[in-house]
Image (spheres, grey):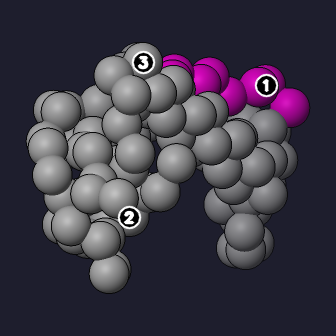
Amino acid sequence: MLITNTEVVANKEIKETLGLVKGNTIKARHIGSDIGASLKNLVGGEVKGYTKMISEAREEAVERMIKEAERVEADAIVNVRFSTSQVMQGAAEILAYGTAVKLKS
């Protein structure tokens, strides 16, 4: 599956637009991460537990978006974007979305 954040795929022609595909997940922080984050807040630096959590959530959202594109037999997903929002204290939603397309052979 080709995935791009541009509106086109280089050297390919889009023959059909299949529509919006998306994948999302909601991840909550672990109490251990919160303690580490509080300490990092005092001294500064990367909060590695949160970085790992958001990275894993992004990958999960992308995989779900790909599965939706495969269900409609897409060849590619163009114009891919990410959105993050807090859904409750300590939990964030990651949304990956784009346009599923068929390419000319």
Badge 1 is on which residue? 31
Badge 3 is on which residue? 71
Residue at horizontal 15 percent and vertical 52 percent from the top:
15
Q: Amino acid at mark 1?
A: Ile
Taking the magenta stretch, the answer to whether it contains residue 19 is: no
Q: In the rendered view, would you say 79 is above or below 16?
A: below
Residue at horizontal 62 percent and vertical 22 percent from the top:
28
Q: Earlier in the sequence, mark 1 or mark 3?
A: 1
Badge 2 is on which residue? 4
Taking the magenta stretch, the answer to whether it contains residue 29 is: yes
Q: In this orientation, does residue 90 appear?
A: no
Left or right: 95 in relation to 18: right
Frontmost residue, 74 versus 52: 74
Asked if disc 1 and disc 2 are in contact, CB closer than 8 Å, the reply is no
Furthest toward the front, the residue is 105
Left or right: 7 in relation to 76: left
Frontmost residue, 54 versus 68: 68
Q: Which residues are magenta?
A: 22-32
Image-quadrant location for residue 24: top left
Q: Secondary structure at mark 3?
A: helix
Please tell me the numbered disc located at residue 53.
none
Q: Amino acid at mark 2?
A: Thr
Q: Earlier in the sequence, mark 1 or mark 2?
A: 2
Q: Secondary structure at mark 1?
A: helix
